[in-house]
Amino acid sequence: MRAPLSWLREYVDLPAGETGRDVQAKLIDAGLEVERVEQLGADLTGPLVVGKVLTIEELEGFRKPIRFCTVDVGTANGTGEPQEIVCGARNFTVGDKVVVALPGAVLPGDFAIAERKTYGKVSRGMICSGDELGMGDDGTHGIIVLSNEHEVGTDAIELLQLVDEVLDIAVTPDRGYCLSMRGIAREAATAYGLPLRDPALLDVPAPNGYGYPVAVADPSGCDRFTARTVTGIDPEAQSPIWLRRRLQKAGMRPISLTVDVTNYVMLELGQPLHAYDRATLDGTIGVRRAQPGEKLTTLDGTKRVLDAEDLVIADNRGPIGLAGVMGGAETEIADHAAGQGSTDVVIEAAHFDAVAIARAARRHRLTTEASKRFERGVDPQAASAAAQRTVDLLVLLAGGTAEAGVTEVVAPSGPRTISIRADHPDRVAGLEYGRETVVRRLQEVGCDVYGQDELIVTVPSWRPDLTDPNDLAEEVIRLEGYANVPSALPAPPAGRGLTHRQRLHRRVGRALAGAGYVEVLNYPFIGDWALDHLGLPADDQRRTTVRLANPLSEAEPALRTTMLPGLFAALRRNDSRGEHDLALFETGLVFQPTGDEGVPARLPVDRRPTDEEIAGLNAALPRQPRRAAVVLAGARERAGWWGQGRPAGWADAVEAGRVVAREAGAELIIRQDQQAPYHPGRCAALSVLIDGQEVAVGNAGELHPRVVKAFGLPERTSAMEIDLDLLERAGDGAVQGPRVSTFPVATQDVALVVDSSVPAADVEAALRDGAGELLESLRLFDVFTGAQLGEGKKSLAYALRFRAADRTLTADEASAARDTAVQAAVERTGAVLRGA
Amino acid sequence: MSAPNKSYDPVEVEALKPEEIERMRDEALAALAAAADLEALREAKAAHMGDRSPLALANREIGALPPQAKAEAGKRVGMARGAVNKALAARQAELEAERDARVLVEEAVDVTLPYDRVPAGARHPLTTIGERIEDVFVAMGYEVAEGPEVEAEWFNFDALNLAPDHPARTMQDTFFVRGTARADSGSAAGAADSGVVLRTHTSPVQIRSMLDREPPVYVICPGRVYRTDELDATHTPVFHQVELLAIDEGLTMADLKGTLDHMVRVLFGEDMRTRLRPSYFPFTEPSAEMDMVCFACRGESVGNPDKACRTCSSEGWIELGGCGMVNPRVLTAAGIDPEKYSGFAFGFGIERMLMFRHNVEDMRDMVEGDVRFTRPFGMEI
């Protein structure tokens, strides 16, 4: 809502020196979000005067039509001689009154007017359009042609009210009444402690039986409908400057006198109005729900198929308006310019149900000034005043005659009361206001208040948002000033810190970052194309996605079931920007439909849902496990003065899995695997033991070359993805302190030759099992293949360290332990001891 | 060894004459002093202290002397050899020190060589600033609560006093999940029937927290949230919020204000202050916008065109987020008796906080995952 300060002053006698910024500060304190104060005409200086066009000479030979005019500006130019001005506009003729900027004037945009030679003439000024004066859209884009009554030489800055301040207020949904000057003036009056001249306090004639007939079939959708008729409107009459300017300053475009008046009264009182051309109405105006399939062409020219829930205004022929949203084209007030202006109009001032209007506006994707107000609540008591005000203005400005008939259809309703303890605001705010202050503030809001300790508060008709004791508490606290609320600290019960799970998530991030990975946070949106690029088989469960009804991009309408596409995009972005040695990680949720999500029940909110009901809501949701994933490419270790570098590869990806699992206190089991999107020979399955069962938790490895190509990634890009929720369950619990032996170590190296298909992990497991308790550690220090081993063989060289807790091992003991270790490897993996 | 000289003639033992021994000693000392390196010293040692050296030979002759002369000659030779030995040790130490110094100089390296063998990793500043905020409240006794990102509308809207037709609950803001039952329906209206959305705020976690716990409830809810904004310099459809919820007996707006003040002081400095402005949220009543003194200019830009502040547009305050007293209707929906308990809540987006706390100008930098943006933030913030 844009509120011109000059207009506001009509209802509140603000101190004369008060600026827009001052009022802004006061209103912000009172809870109105005044986003900015627009300074109209601040960058405008005269002379800017009314002139009369005396002569027009059409200049020939230029690419566009140009006129050389003489304009009588009276003595404003100091000489009294006609002012010579070159002008490119054509919407004026000799004798028209126009607005002239004389040399020395500066127009908005730092546009200085000076004498200048142009088109072979000397132009001494400019004939102005509304745009050039910063007046806002007047729908013509031509120069301003004033009505004839204005004297030449009159100062146009004042005449056109070009200097003003406009408060731009973002009205929150609860403050529908502030979508009107009346509401804002009320807040300003309270904020300044000044009386309000309420523009809705008008003498309104009592309803009678001979107004335009109205039948409300749906009183729950429309609890009030006032109809008034004005006849004999002069179709040539135009909106006066003050009216047009106020509309413009409030951000609306002047259209025609009747429409301008209804818009003006809406801005003034907050009551949306509609004017029907009586000549086009056919019988009683009815308010009812639409019949399914009924059609209506609204004023914006859109033909709409109506829904059975839509509230419509109808006459004998059918719907003539979407109630509270937009009128129909057929009964539109005809434009006088079309030569067939409406002379008799019926004014509608009605009150519609907020929910019905909200739904209709949403259904038809049609948000209008009217629907915005009805959705947020309009003062039902202001309807007859608004109708009266509209009638008065049409009589005054358009020469119309008010018909004596006054139609009012009103569904009975009583005032709403709230009972509230007098100290309730104190208990909400944490400071003592006292009963007197509370009562006074509520009265300023417009409430009637009775009672002592327990107050019975009748809320005003324009505040449908006031329904609960806390609503009233807020009114008191805001008017007393939020700034006066003191600062205290509550004392929560002693806390337990982060949960095991939360600490794990932090550790995983730190560990990966410590290992050289940079964290990224990707959007979880993916498209099927990404799943195709990953090479997922048709039955892969990662292809079953949660899909959005209104995605930002049709290319990515689903939620991720794997972290990898997002990481690939981030890797590729970095690579294309010139960073090539990359290691990225992300932790976050993936979304897995269970397949049996039902539509969740619409639960009530006036009680706690039962545990079954909560379980029902949760069952409607997909599984959302947390994952950690990495992707890496380029050099893992760079070359430099220290020597060779090392490219990132599958082993780094698998190691990233180990890093994550280690933080969870889980031992990662690694097996050969073949899984999209990985290289079939370089893919590891990652699993852990949970309650003695081996559970798959992820994969790691080098990406399949086709995947690398499809995503445009660097060659040999590797990746890892692992489920943190499962890892969390795999943790071993508290670490048991090892007993550290100080006896000497006995080291034994063995080289075992096995088939190259035998996993090193199996050989290592056999060695460990065979070596027994004396084995302190075991490390694979070399892998060798070569002709001397034979085709399809590899040699694995291990360093075994033996140590006893209670004695120095003899050479024989160490050798014996080694031999049993080797024996186990021989039996379980077909290993042959090299050099034996 | 020569046999005892039976025909004793002291004059014959030339080598044991005092002046002769002195000469030998001086020659040895001179040779040691002249040795320029350890090799030369080794040779000088062999020549003057070895088995065949004059002093060694002279020593051997002592046995031939008559007993009365033995003692004196022995003392003389012993003193000479002692002096030479001492000089040798000193020279040896001297030359070894010289050699060591030379070798270490030769082994010197350029310690300014760079060592960027493994590029550094880093955590995302949104993660670490979120943790930092969590820690402020965990230290006060709050719990950190989490919840699903794909959420039932009842948790995201209804329970928060956002009735189905509430103006704040508009299609424009919310990502709706397409229902499986109506997977064929592309229309937004049909899809809205799934009853499932991407959470538009972390407030549903507040509801879950209240349902899961008996009051008092003190939780902080950080997380990812979704709104249908296009990505630009100041908007992202996926962003991060932190919300706080406190439910206890007798909590007031003063407690809210104090908690906010504490937070901004811990995160931004002891001189920080907050300001509450009346506002409207369906889930709180009374509601407020919370501002803090501008972190960049500390308010000094107000009315001071020479010190214009881009962070706060010279307003002196930065809008932090929304807050208020939990609407009793919300308590009721979450099974908490509003007659007995009251509570406060606040929430804010941490992207914005990161922007003004660390002078980040473009929100896209937080989204795109460019390592050049993230690396400088390191492990903690």
Image: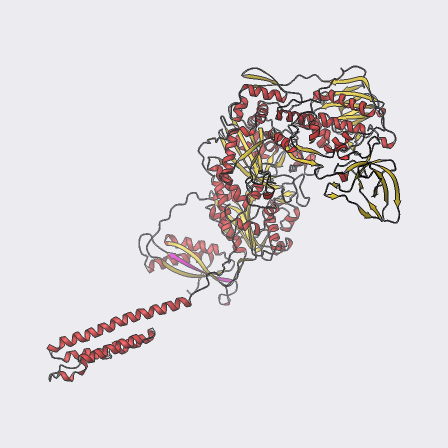
Q: Is residue B337 visible?
A: no
The relative height of residue A48 versus residue A231 in the rendered view (above or below) is below
- The image quadrant that residue B40 belongs to is bottom left
Q: Is residue B61 left or right of residue A394?
A: left
Task: Depth check: give the residue in front, A190 or B47.
Answer: A190
The colour scheme applied to this rendered structure is: secondary structure
Instruction: Please provide the residue range marked out in magenta.
Output: A792-801
Residue A794 forms part of the magenta stretch: yes
- The image quadrant that residue B298 belongs to is top right
Instruction: Tally the numbered discs.
Output: 0
- Residue A254 in percent (x, y) is at 78, 32
Q: Is residue A179 left or right of residue A491?
A: right
Q: Is residue A96 left or right of residue A3?
A: right
Residue B188 forms part of the magenta stretch: no
Q: Main secondary structure of the magenta part?
A: strand
- Which residue appears at 41% of the width and 67% of the height? B105
The relative height of residue B205 versus residue B38 in the rendered view (above or below) is above
Q: Is residue A409 visible?
A: yes
Task: Depth check: give the residue in front, B231 or B80.
Answer: B80
- Residue A55 in percent (x, y) is at 88, 40
Task: Depth check: give the residue in front, B171 or A709.
Answer: B171
Q: Is residue A539 left or right of residue A298?
A: left
- Residue A778 in percent (x, y) is at 42, 56
Task: Depth check: give the residue in front, A595 or A777.
Answer: A777
The relative height of residue A272 versus residue A90 in the rendered view (above or below) is above
Give the quarter of the figure containing the N terminus of chain B: bottom left
The relative height of residue A834 versus residue A515 in the rendered view (above or below) is below
- Residue A283 in percent (x, y) is at 83, 21
